[in-house]
Image (cartoon, rainbow, N blue to C red):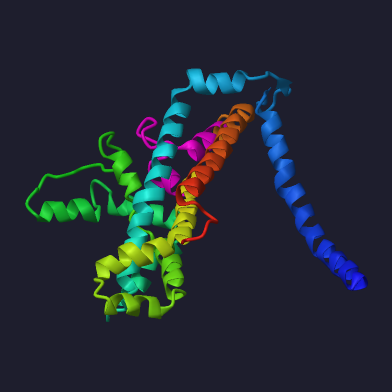
Amino acid sequence: MALNTTKNIKWVIAFLVPTILLFLFMYAFSLIILFGSSFTDWTLGMKVSFTGLRNYLELFTDNEDFLKSVFNTVVWIGLQATVHVTIGVTVALILARREFYWKFVRTVYMIPNIISSAALGMMFLCFLNPDFGALNSIIRLAGQKDFSQNWLMDYKTSFFTVTMMWLPFAAVVTILVLAELAAIPESIFESARVDGATELGINLHISLPMLRNIIGTCAILAGTSMLQKLDMILMTTGGGPGNRTMNLPIFIYQNALKDNNFGLANAAGVTLILIGIVTVWIISRAFRMGHSNT
């Protein structure tokens, strides 16, 4: 027995070593550089010098774009983890009834999620164009002949418009919840119907409590997806008008790749990571992830 245990440990180590090395070189080493360089004045072409907390003080006390990007990022995380997930779960509960339309709706609803974000951004850019866009054209046909709203670059509408480019499209949440629903024994639902429970009652008192862990997982995936939302915003508004639709990835991109201020960008990157950790912690606590559904 001891010999077999030793062999098993050797095999476990053999399989773990490549993964650990990959993590150390691809992630851990990069995180160390990111954190360390956030305390430096690191500008392309200039000598790197240690500046202590100066980058963080500048970000939180004297950088309006950064504060706005943090605010937008947090708002989008909240909307994704609540409204976006609620839409996906609701669609899943409807499709789980397997009416005649369920396969068609499931397939069509998935289309925006299988198109690249950059291509989707270009589609919205054309759809919302103030001159030839389909949305303005439809409004003109409805009677507003001179209507010409610049949905993406108007300060009053840009944030809402950008948000609606991803908020309703919760097909990934729907698919995950549908898979979890399929794993619940049908006998539980049949017993509830025999006892006189309505479909609404079954969803509220049986389905949703049993789906708590997967809904929590979806909330984490949806919320943290806002920490990497770059290409769609870059293709449509670029963070504008002004800083109205700027988020942390856009702020980091502009400071690192446009202004070549890597020290300031990496300080913002550390902030982004901390927001992600806090997001995961809050959602895990809210949904009591890992605890029994009973």
Let me know if residue 245 is in the magenta part: yes
Residue 19, quarter of the rendered image: bottom right
Q: Residue lying farthest left?
A: 143
Q: Residue lying farthest right?
A: 3
Total numbered circles: 0
The one of 292 and 82 positioned closer to us in this rendering: 292
Give the side of residue 133 with respect to residue 229, left or right: left
* Residue 112 visible at all: no
Q: Residue lying farthest front?
A: 195
The residue at 25%/66% (across/down) is 200
Q: Magenta segment, which residues?
A: 229-256
* Residue 45 visible at all: yes
The residue at 77%/54% (across/down) is 20
The residue at 67%/19% (across/down) is 52
- Residue 196 at x, y percent in the picture: 24, 75
Give the side of residue 278 with respect to residue 103, left or right: right
The quarter in which the N terminus is drawn is bottom right
Query: Does residue 159 lie above or below 40 as drawn?
Result: below
Query: Does residue 192 lie above or below 235 as drawn?
Result: below
Let me know if residue 243 is in the magenta part: yes
- Residue 268 at x, y percent in the picture: 56, 32
The one of 160 and 87 positioned closer to us in this rendering: 87
Query: Does residue 156 lie above or below 217 as drawn?
Result: above
Give the side of residue 62 with respect to residue 273, left or right: left
- Residue 288 at x, y percent in the picture: 49, 51
The residue at 27%/66% (across/down) is 201
